[in-house]
Image (cartoon, rainbow, N blue to C red):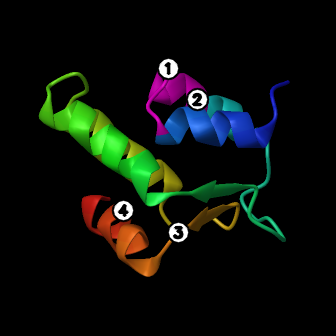
Amino acid sequence: MRERKQILMDIVSLNGNLSTLKEELANYQWDSKVPVLNILNQDLVNVFKRCIDDRISLENLVAMANIIECRDDIEFQNEEMQEVIFELA
């Protein structure tokens, strides 16, 4: 079984099938005492650019936001990026 952090990284970067990644992530509890992944602004900017360039669909971007929204195991670099994810979801 892959580590939670790697699965979350793949979800955030849209690296792989989101349905499969979501199933893989389901092997771990929703709650986490500490974040295992810190999402930097640049991580999300890179994904947004890929969407703007039509390399990923807006549907996948929204699906990613729905998966990572409000997770205890993810920390955002700042509240503004967290708000962007909330709005996308």
Q: Secondary structure at mark 1?
A: loop
| Mark 3, residue position | 77
Q: Earlier in the sequence, mark 1 or mark 3?
A: 1
Q: Earlier in the sequence, mark 1 or mark 2?
A: 1
Q: Tell me how far mark 1 sits from mark 3, CA to CA.
A: 24 Å
Q: Tell me how far mark 1 sits from mark 2, CA to CA.
A: 7 Å
Q: Tell me how far mark 2 sits from mark 3, CA to CA.
A: 23 Å
Q: Tell me how far mark 3 sits from mark 4, CA to CA.
A: 12 Å
Q: Is residue 61 left or right of residue 43?
A: left
Pointer 1 with pointer 2, Cβ within 8 A: yes
Q: Tell me how far mark 1 sits from mark 4, CA to CA.
A: 19 Å
Pointer 1 with pointer 3, Cβ within 8 A: no
Q: Tell me how far mark 4 sits from mark 2, CA to CA.
A: 18 Å
Name the residue at the front extreme.
42
Q: Earlier in the sequence, mark 3 or mark 4?
A: 3
- Residue 85 makes an appearance in the image: yes
Residue 16: mark = 1
Amino acid of disc 4: Ile
Q: Quadrant of the C terminus?
A: bottom left
Nearer the camera: disc 3 or disc 4: 3
Q: Against 77, is 36 above or below?
A: above
Q: Position of residue 3 (x, y in %)?
A: 81, 35
Residue 49: mark = none
